[in-house]
Amino acid sequence: MKSMTGFGCGTATADNLTCTVEIKSVNARYLDLFIRSPKQINPFENLIREQIQQHVARGKVEVSVSIQDVGERPKTFTINRVLREQIQEMLVEQGFYTTLKEVPLSAVMSVSNEWIQQQDEPVAEDVMISVVTEATGRAVAQLLQMRSEEGRHIQEDLLSRISTLKSTIRRIDDNKSVAVENYRNHILSKIKEYLIELEASISEDRFLQEIAILADKTDITEEIVRFTSHVVQLKNTLIDENPIGRKLDFILQEMNREVNTIGSKTVDSNITEWVVQLKCELEKIREQVQNVE
């Protein structure tokens, strides 16, 4: 079980080139991946994206990539022949020389050396791929470690709350029969009083049958059975190593539905109080689950 919150940083160096990758993630419904990188990294962003997608299924993920030279890189020189010839022509026009061929390079250099362009030798593609993938791999490893640690804390909290759910639904189950019987006797008493006031009569069998039908509408056995089954599903899902956030969302929706039905059926004050406790625990669980991958 993993959280969607985490941070990771990785660095790799090769051929006097250092690449640093920082990854941070927060909770989101789907995987939302954004990469911020310098221009020379653009051709390799898909490599970064693929590495992250292999390990991250959900979350808003922001990636920052930086490149830095850590040593002298070989130089390359380019001659701007057009600019050089323009300088030679200027020297001839000013009378220093009679023909272009007579103008030595030293004279051209004394005027300007901008016609010789110097730049760092470009980094080989395989070197760039190597440092980018290695740095990304290290950042992903740190990210996953942090997400796993956070996931363990969430799991411990949820397991504790599941124990509370189990004990509370057990109380409701233990008291449901008494609650139904109390409701039955309450209805029986009220109807008898009503019939006496009206000086009406009804057969005892028919009377008891109608009372049983009314009392049966408050029976919550099926809801308790389904809720208990969902509690087991919830606990079993928490130990799954695969992404489980959406499945947990679905189970919690079903559990809330059963609790709401129990609350609407019961007229027992104790059960009503326990229903409120269940709803509070389910809401706390739901808040935690929002950050589960």
Image (spheres, rainbow, N blue to C red):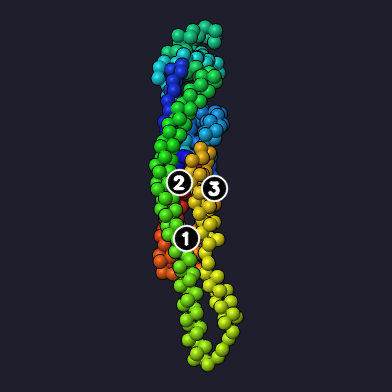
Q: Give the x, y percent position of residue 104.
A: 49, 7
| Residue beneath disc 3 | 247
Q: Secondary structure at mark 3?
A: helix
Q: In the image, residue 236 lies at what x, y percent?
A: 51, 44
Q: CA distance from mark 1 to mark 3?
A: 26 Å
Is residue 189 or residue 35 the one in the foreground? 189
Find residue 19 and report its image quarter. Answer: top left
Label 3 is placed on what type of residue?
Answer: Lys
Q: Are marks 3 and 2 in contact (CB under 8 Å)?
A: no
Q: Is residue 67 above or below residue 215?
A: above
Q: Which residue is mark 2?
A: 291
- Which percent across, then down, holds residue 290? 47, 49
Instruction: Tell me how far mark 2 sits from mark 1, CA to CA.
Output: 32 Å
x 47%, y 60%: residue:
173
- Separation of residues labelled 3 and 2 (CA atoms): 13 Å
Up-down: is 217 above or below 153? below
Work out which residue is located at the far bottom of the displayed protein and give it: 199
Q: Residue at x 50, y 14 (%)?
A: 77
For disc 3, the neighbor class at 10 Å (few under 14, some 14 to 19, many from 20) is some
Q: Quadrant of residue 272?
A: bottom left
The type of residue carrying mark 2 is Asn
Sequence-earlier tag: 2 or 1: 1
Q: Which label's residue is closer to the chain start, 3 or 2? A: 3
- What is the x, y in percent for residue 69? 42, 21
Q: Residue at x 48, y 82 (%)?
A: 190
Q: Is residue 198 above or below residue 216?
A: below
Number of residue marks: 3
Q: Disc 1 designates what residue?
A: 173
Decide: few, some or many residues near mark 2? Use Cα within 10 Å; few <14, some 14-19, many ≥20: many
